[in-house]
Amino acid sequence: MENKTEQILTELKKAIVGKDVILKKVYMAILAGGHILLEDVPGVGKTTLALAFSKALGLDYKRVQFTSDSVPSDITGFSVFDKSQNKFVYQKGAAITNLLLADEINRTSSKTQSALLETMEERQVTVDGVSHPLPSPFIVLATQNPVGSAGTQMLPPSQMDRFMIKLEMGYPDFKSQVNILKDRHNENPLDFVQPVVSPRDILHMQSKVQSIHTDDEIYEYVTRLAEYSRKLESVELGISPRGALSVCRIAKAHAYVNGRDYVVPEDIRNIFCDVCAHRIVITQRAKLSGQNGLSAAIETLNNVPVPPIGIKGKKL
């Protein structure tokens, strides 16, 4: 199957204006088999982005608006007694889909958050002792609203670590804002997004991404980055083994999207902060001095030597 990255991005840009880099990074996370966390203020297009991806990738889509009274069965489903069959019948929850938009995940209880994060890790739900596999591919695109803390239940580090990548969309620039106002004056651009691939095609592309060549020096480079982050004085918890693995997986997707069948250091460097900043836990003293996970990730990236890997993944 040919690389259809450009066709997919073209369709996505019909609905999402001026956010080409974000679109590409979300797409790479999907190709790498990961889940995405979008943290941003309301109204910048997070829901539109999820809908656009579901259309362009031909995915079944469901959305859960999390609130304080959301319960785990909203995600996993539940059993009800069917008199005609004289037995309990499973009623599907929101997780039985390809692309699940978990809107404002920080607005629900820790128990409901855990139910969602369990499905992300195990790709199945268990109800009354019976396991139900999720469709493939299965992608969670969760959102968090960083404004206001009332009624929120922030994800602990162990759960943040389940998200392959964390992104912020940000406000559109002046030209993009004008185009958004014009495009949405009489019609919804989402109506014009056409499917380019199918779920089966995505599984094939994910397989191609997994087979991208990665030199041992690249694995050693990622390991050095992870180890450096763990030794920083400002850091309480550095990059986990799961985080290092996520860096390698999405670096392969970065190579694939850029038309290569091998990974180079630039693939690592271009996605490192997006994959690792939310995984790094800063000490309280460092927080008081204005440091955060992103500053620690940047410091790590700037201080670990880049291996001399060039064309076709060979040593220079």
Image (cartoon, grey):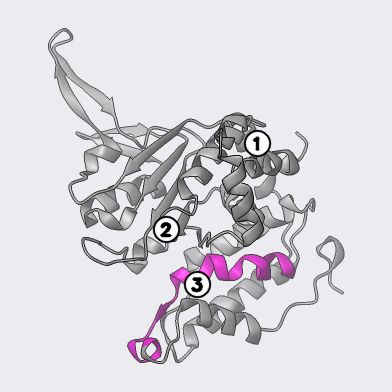
- 213 and 154: which is toward the camera: 154
Classified by dominant secondary structure, the portion drawn in magenta counts as helix
The numbered mark at residue 277 is 3
Calculate the distance from the C-alpha at mark 2 to the C-alpha at mark 3: 13 Å
Residue at 67% x, 67% y: name it.
270
Labels 1 and 3 touching (C-beta < 8 A): no
The percent coordinates of residue 283 (x first, y second) are 37, 86
Element class at badge 3: helix
Q: Which of the 4 quarters of the picture holds residue 263?
A: bottom right
Density class for disc 2 (Cα within 10 Å; few <14, some 14-19, many ≥20) is: many
Labels 2 and 1 touching (C-beta < 8 A): no
Q: Which residue is mark 1?
A: 204
Does residue 286 show up magenta in the picture?
yes
Residue at 54% x, 76% y: name it.
226
Q: Specify the quadrant that holds the N terminus.
A: top right
First in sequence: mark 2 vs mark 1: 2
Task: Say what amino acid the circle numbered 1 marks.
Answer: His
Residue at 29% x, 40% y: name it.
75
First in sequence: mark 1 vs mark 3: 1
